[in-house]
Image (tube, helix red, strand yellow):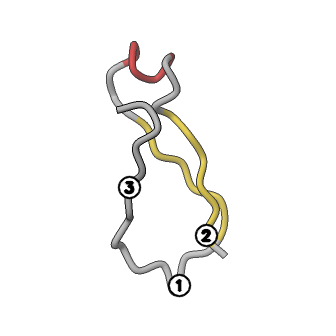
Amino acid sequence: MPGEEIEIIKPFQDYTGLFLYHCHNLEHEDLGMMRNFYVS
């Protein structure tokens, strides 16, 4: 839902940098369900 927050529980100790998550439904992708997140 708009404004909803999530927590990713995947450990990223060995994986830092910029990653992408997305929805496979193209209509959803156009509505912002394709974003970058940065792990530092």
Q: Position of residue 11 (x, y in %)?
A: 40, 80
- Evaluate if marks 1 and 3 touch, with contact meaning CB atoms under 8 Å apart: no
Is residue 36 found left or right of 2 in the rendered image? right
Is residue 39 found left or right of 1 in the rendered image? right
Q: CA distance from mark 2 to mark 1?
A: 10 Å
Q: Which residue lies at the image location 66% right of the left edge and 67% below the top edge? A: 17
**In terms of depth relative to the viewer, which is nearer, 15 or 34?**
34
Q: Which residue lies at the image location 55% right of the left edge and 76% below the top edge? A: 15
- Evaluate if marks 2 and 1 touch, with contact meaning CB atoms under 8 Å apart: no
Judged from this view, the residue extending furthest toward the bottom is 13
Q: Position of residue 6 (x, y in %)?
A: 38, 55
| N-terminal label among 1 and 3 | 3
- Looking at the image, is 9 positioned above or below residue 21? below
Kind of residue at badge 2: Val
Q: Which residue is mark 1?
A: 14
Q: Which residue is mark 3?
A: 6
Q: Which residue is mark 2?
A: 39
- Looking at the image, is 30 positioned above or below residue 19? above
Q: CA distance from mark 1 to mark 3?
A: 21 Å
| Viewer-side label of 3, 2 | 3
Instruction: Report the quarter where the C terminus lies.
Output: bottom right
Q: Which residue lies at the image location 51% right of the left edge and 86% below the top edge? A: 13
Q: CA distance from mark 3 to mark 2?
A: 15 Å
Kindly state the secondary structure of the residue where label 3 is placed. loop
Kindly state the secondary structure of the residue where label 2 is placed. strand
